Amino acid sequence: MTQNMSFLRNFFLYKCLFALTFWNHVSLSVEDELFTSVSNNFSEVGSNQKIKSLPLLYQSKDNFDWVVIQNTTESLSLSEITNDNVKKLVALLSNFRQGSRLQNLTLTNVSVDWDALMEIFQTVWHSSIEYFNISNVTQLSDIEHYDFDYSGTSMKALTMKKIQVTDLYFIQDYLYRIFADMNIADMTIANSEMIHMLCPSSKSPFRYLNFLKNDLTDFLFQKCDNLLQLETLILQKNKFESLRKASFMTSLMKSLKYLDMSNNLLRHDGADVQCQWAESLSELDLSSNQLADAVFECLPVNVRKLSLQNNQISRVPRGMAELKSLEELNLASNRLADLPGCSGFRSLQSLNIEMNSILTPSADFFQSCPRVRELQAGHNPFKCSCELQAFIGLERRSGGKLFGWPAAYVCEYPEGLRGTELKDFHLSQLACNTTLLLVTALLLTLVLVAAVAFLCIYLDVPWYVRMTWQWTQTKRRAWHNPPGDQGPFLQFHAFISYSERDSLWVKNELIPNLEKGEGCVQLCQHERNFIPGKSIVENIINCIEKSYKSIFVLSPNFVQSEWCHYELYFAHHKLFSETSNSLILILLEPIPPYLIPARYHKLKALMAKRTYLEWPKERSKRALFWANLRAAISVNLPKADENWCEETD
């Protein structure tokens, strides 16, 4: 019955206070009021049911029994604290002695003098509060010495954000010593334009220090040997410049495990300067600084997780000190042109190299880094070429170790392939295998050479080349000879080309029938018209050039004569060069096709395309033969040569 009555009394009190709070929230517009804003929460089961947090709006004109609150509230948030109501705040907090349920206190929008601020801290220090958060603080008066009593506190963590000090000229020890000597585990001073922090006067219990977004410089904690228990130090977004000094800052922090110095101005020029980091340091964040390749000369040897993202690193130099314990390395957003090897990172398991300048990453990465389980190499300007084919196959061979595949891996060059995912880019093995390509090209070249050689031999190309050369040389000599050496006009109706074995027919039948009688024909015969002293080829060319027609007496003997072939070649050349119908073919005896050599392809073509006169065996048909032959030769020579027939008679 007693327990039920206690619960009903507390519940009735809560309902009354909630109604008062609701009414005040709606209608109150009085300035400089102090209020609390906390959530409601009841225990669902159990006999000792108490209010853990309580929403309450407090007006200075009201009185309230705070003893009730101190036994029922665990979290309290206060706002709009000024010099006018700070004494009421101190009076309120004084009720929360050690042993009360209040553990969390949050103060926002605090604007008080230095002494009042210190009184708040001192009161909280000796209360039951374990986690104290204070933000948007403006310190109004001059900073003076304050004898802070650090004894008997329940506080575990202090968080201060956006602290504004209006006193521009003060003794730094008065301000920084208050916080440096606090014997608590965690302290955060963030976004407060703090330019310095002192080393604790004695061995400090600090395990966690967070000085995010201040104006701290390289002078912080130099030669400080009282932070032996510090494990986490966050110095992000400050104004540190020297990586070497940062290393010496940590050298005496024997328990330091995590250091965040990202978003600073850190540089390291090498210059054979030694760095000295805490041996216990296992996680280091140096991202968003101004570090270049020399940073690898100044790294903690026992680091396990290292972030160098968004710096100016172009390569991982060889010969660097080996980081035997490094398991995770972040090199994203740098200037690297290739994947780094693992010669200095034997234990590396995860590598982030996104957003660099890698065109064709090495495909042997996982061979040199066998322990790597995850590689983030996307968002690079990949050049889709043969060199990239091996890297594309890396995804299949690595068993899914490429993080972000395939969306993050896209061709940037050439422009025609821009935007194509690497998984959709393919080239043939022949196009990308240099050895195979060379072997194929060599084989094709050999086949081509063999084919050309075969055709040359089959078609007797060397012979034609030689004949063309001789014809060209003869024409050149004729061009340079004096005009009197050779007549500029045609002298013969026809040049006779025949085999010596057919000479009896030529002398007994052809010449007499054409040169004698009516319609005398002037014939050029090698026995009587070749000029002594000149080469045979030159005589052949001259005779053909001085004749209107060229008569070829064809027989099996003809195709076996080398000189007949020459004469046919030059006559055929004249036929095409002058575009005239100057060839007359006489088939003295049938020529089986198999007897015609391969190089006589011109003769085959002529016999297939041109009409030839066949010598009749019957005497009765020979008169028609001679008439047709005369008609084929029928041309008129200049009058200067009309005495030819008389001379031959």
Image: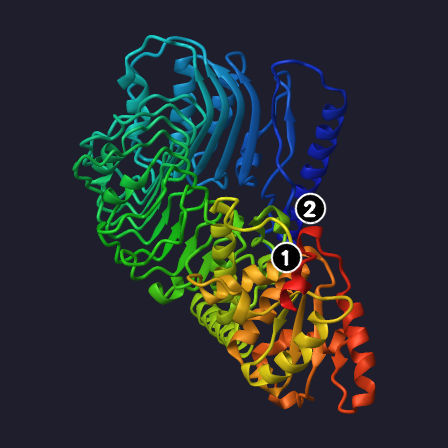
Note whether 597 is above or below 227 in the view shown. Answer: below
Coordinates of residue 556 in the picture (x, y in percent): 61, 87
- Residue at position x 79%, y 79% in the image: 625
Q: Which mark is residue 642?
A: none
Quadrant where the image shows the C terminus: bottom right
* Residue 440 in sight from this viewpoint: yes
Q: Which residue, given by chain and number where applicable, does mark 1 sit on?
A: 491
Q: Residues within 10 Å of mark 2 (few under 14, many from 20)?
A: few
Q: Nearer the viewer, mark 2 or mark 1?
A: 1
* Amino acid at circle 2: Leu
User: Is 404 left, or right, of 493 in this rendering?
Assistant: left
Query: Where is residue 382 drawn, in percent x and y?
Result: 52, 51
Q: Which residue is mark 2?
A: 8
What residue sits 58% from the left and 70% below the top? 525
Q: Residue at x 45, y 46 (%)?
A: 332
Amino acid carrying label 1: it is: Gln
Q: Is residue 584 left or right of residue 34?
A: right
Name the residue nearer the viewer: 610 or 451.
Answer: 610
Q: Position of residue 404 (x, y in %)?
A: 55, 57
